[in-house]
Image (tube, grey):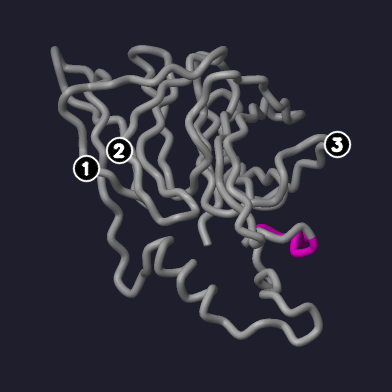
Amino acid sequence: WVSGSAYDAVRQRVVLFDCAPWEWNGATWTQRKAPARPSARLETALAYGVGHQRAVLFGGWDSYETFFSDTWEWDGYEWRALATPVHPVAREGHALAYDARRGVVVLFGGVNLGGARFDDTWEWDGIVWRERTPNVRPPARSNHAIIVAQKKEGGGPVPAALDVVQMCAFGSTSSRERRTARRAEPESPESGSRSPRSAGCGSPESCSSSPR
């Protein structure tokens, strides 16, 4: 299951979120305690905005098949839930990347509870989400990645266009296939319903003392 992660270039460490924020400084993992934080979730996305000096987290879903459309920022010390009247619809399996040239976090794609994949593009400038509607865009997809391509111009690297890259892992399944498989699981005799995945970050009780 996918956790959100991003590189904090200012503090020079990797930030990971599954049930709680973790940081990797190149030698050790440290769990960062925070009184307020996003709920436990899977297949969210996290990107670090150098211009904002904060990591932004959007969306994801939990083991009860609740899909999220919330936006959070992490400054290295605390999480802050952001009020965003306009935002992408709830989804998981989307991708985020920071475009340093324009100073925005870009979101593309993802999938909803019904299995419908998105081909929409959104930008977060640190204050508001804005939907972008380019005439040409990649086909709808989920569980992919966005990278910021770098090219040499005049002897130095400069930010180039965002390049959307589909991640294809051998033996992997799509989010829709995983949900279909879970719906086929037998019901719990105690409750008459499917129980949440055990040992998965999507359930609050699974938050453990080490990153997965």
Q: Which residue is mark 3?
A: 35
Instruction: Give residue 119's mark.
Output: 2
Instruction: State the residue in front, 148 or 1.
Output: 1
The mark nearer the N terminus, 3 or 2, is 3
Amino acid type for the residue under numbered disc 1: Pro
| Quadrant of the drawing holding the C terminus | bottom right
User: Which quadrant of the structure image shows residue 140?
Assistant: top left
Q: Residue at x 26, y 50 (%)?
A: 166
Q: Residue at x 68, y 46 (%)?
A: 22
Relative placement, left or right, of 180 versus 169 is: right
Start-end of magenta stretch: 205-211
* Of the two numbered discs 3 and 1 in the rendering, the one whose residue sits closer to the viewer: 1
Q: Residues within 10 Å of mark 3 (few under 14, many from 20)?
A: few
Q: Which residue is mark 1?
A: 139
The mark nearer the N terminus, 1 or 2, is 2
Q: Residue furthest right?
A: 35
Amino acid type for the residue under numbered disc 3: Pro
Q: Residue furthest front?
A: 192
* Of the two numbered discs 3 and 2 in the rendering, the one whose residue sits closer to the viewer: 2
